[in-house]
Amino acid sequence: MVSAAPQEVIQSALDGIVPDDHIFGTEFRYDPETGEIQSIARVPAGYGKVAVLDELRAALPLSRDRIVYVGDGSSDVQVMMHVNRLDGLTIAVSENKYINQIAQRTVLSDDALSVLVPVLETIVGWAPLRIREFFEGNGFVLREWDKVQTDSLTICRVPDALPAAAGVA
């Protein structure tokens, strides 16, 4: 888990789910007497997430094409571009149009298990029927699964005072 949020907050939220040594968040140096933040020791946001990913890749026997990165905002842009360059899988989990342009897949759902679908399709190579059977065999039903490609368009009338674009009549 790599997040720009304070490490202690992430550890508290994921206590008993993700081991502390698998969590990489913003680390602060605290004043020993007052407990106030003195400085920032590490910020895994933006390019900082790329640095954490590269540290993990150096420490773990991990094939480049087996990296899966899930993100939802602007602090994920650099690491998603890095993972794409490594032939990994990037998944956006929000309607943020800037991150969706970079991510290979976008999954919108209220259930965290939903990110398994593109992983099972892309990395494991399962067909949709096999994925549905897998979920059903584990007590879940994919009730709705709409696979769409979305074009986001804005069209506006050109004011009469502006000249027509070159070559366009």
Image: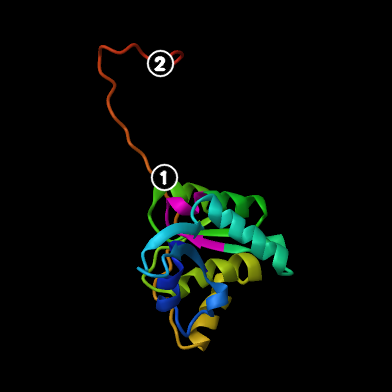
Figure coloring: rainbow
Image side of residue 157 versus residue 22, left or right: left
Which residue is labeled 1 in the image? Answer: 151
- Vertical arrangement, residue 15 with respect to residue 112, above or below: below
Point 46% across, 52% down: residue: 75
Closest to the observer, 54 or 97: 54
Point 59% across, 64% down: residue: 68
State the mark number for residue 168.
none
Q: Amino acid at mark 2?
A: Ala
* Chain-order first, disc 2 or disc 1: 1
User: Is residue 130 covered in magenta?
Assistant: no
- Vertical arrangement, residue 10 with respect to residue 149, above or below: below
- Image quadrant in which the C terminus is located: top left
Counting from the top left corner in percent of width and height, residue 73 is at 42, 54
Counting from the top left corner in percent of width and height, residue 121 is at 59, 67
Point 26% across, 11% down: residue: 161
Kindly tell me whether residue 54 is visible in this rendering.
Answer: yes
Total labels: the figure holds 2
Kindly tell me whether residue 149 is visible in this rendering.
Answer: no
| Secondary structure of residue under mark 2 | loop
Magenta segment: 69-77
Image side of residue 88 versus residue 23, left or right: right
Q: Amino acid at mark 1?
A: Asp
Q: How many angstroms separate mark 2 from mark 1 (CA)?
A: 23 Å
Counting from the top left corner in percent of width and height, residue 105 is at 51, 57
Point 54% across, 66% down: residue: 118
Which residue is labeled 2 in the image? Answer: 165
Closest to the observer, 67 or 165: 67
Q: Residue 38 appears in which quarter of the rendering?
A: bottom left
Image side of residue 129 versus residue 13, left or right: right
| Secondary structure of residue under mark 1 | loop
Q: Label 1 neighbourhood size at 10 Å, few (<14), some (14-19), many (20+)?
A: few
